[in-house]
Image (spheres, coloured by chain):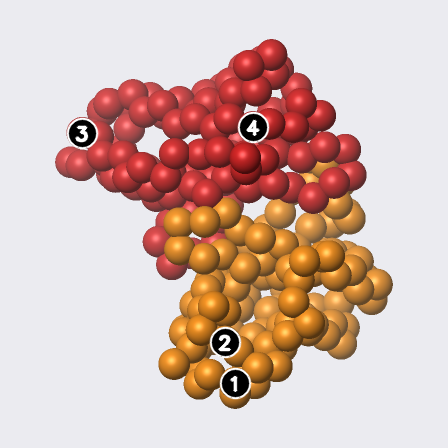
Chain colours: A orange, B red
Amino acid sequence: DAMVIQNPRYQVTQFGKPVTLSCSQTLNHNVMYWYQQKSSQAPKLLFHYYDKDFNNEADTPDNFQSRRPNTSFCFLDIRSPGLGDAAMYLCATSRRRRAANEKLFFGSGTQLSVL
Amino acid sequence: QKEVEQDPGPLSVPEGAIVSLNCTYSNSAFQYFMWYRQYSRKGPELLMYTYSSGNKEDGRFTAQVDKSSKYISLFIRDSQPSDSATYLCAMSVGNNDMRFGAGTRLTVKP
């Protein structure tokens, strides 16, 4: 089945130690998104790629970076994780860019803990 | 005031009950309204999608949008234990990003 796959499911890192989360998709969608979801809060968009065009949200901290080496893969790099970065990180894809009625396909998420 | 408000619950109902989940919003420009279902330790999946005001029915699920009141609802008839999940409302304007609610956690007890 075509899907969005995130690895790992659970990631534990130390305060200040760089960490990379990965996402792959078999849907061949043009757009890939990274969301941060803290407990009992709404998912918050960090950035998205439309093909190779990177789009950062205005309030996304510089500590968060992303790479998309090809259509299928996208990575989230957290350069110096703080305790406040502990959250579920969700990768999503869509066919079109920010179209109002565009369906998002989500991965199962990576739960990040920062010790 | 948050752009999208959703009661986080938790909400617990017996099997077979009718469930009502709701969101309110402040941006009158929102035109597209969605409900996502998120099972524990999984990503959200699209459940229902409606455009502007009105009702939409899909099996046991009915989505309602009242733009005049800035209020949307999701009704689940004959609820099942398999409906136990967190339900997130989401909405958007034209080409803008979706805005999500915080989600309501629902438990349907056998």
- Furthest residue toward front: B1
Query: What element does badge 3 sit on?
Result: strand
Q: Which residue is mark 1?
A: A16
**Residue A109: x %, y % from top left:** 48, 63
Residue A59, image quadrant: bottom right
Labelled pair 2, 1 in contact (Cβ < 8 Å): yes
Mark sitting earlier along the chain (2/1) = 1
- Give the label, 4 or 2, closer to the camera: 2
- Please determine if labels 2 and 1 lie on a single subunit: yes
> Amino acid under label 2?
Gly
Numbered label attached to residue A82:
2
Res A94 visible: yes
Q: Which residue is mark 3?
A: B14
Chain letter belonging to callout 1: A
Labelled pair 1, 3 in contact (Cβ < 8 Å): no
> Amino acid under label 3?
Pro
Q: Which quadrant of the figure contains the N terminus of chain A?
A: bottom right
Res B60 visible: no
Q: Which residue is mark 4?
A: B25
Q: CA distance from mark 1 to mark 4?
A: 37 Å
**Residue B28: x %, y % from top left:** 67, 23
Labelled pair 4, 3 in contact (Cβ < 8 Å): no
Labelled pair 4, 2 in contact (Cβ < 8 Å): no
Labelled pair 1, 4 in contact (Cβ < 8 Å): no
In the image, is residue A51 above or below residue B24?
below
Residue B15, image quadrant: top left
Chain letter belonging to callout 4: B
- Please determine if labels 1 and 4 lie on a single subunit: no
**Residue B100: x %, y % from top left:** 55, 41
> Amino acid under label 4?
Tyr
> Amino acid under label 1?
Gly
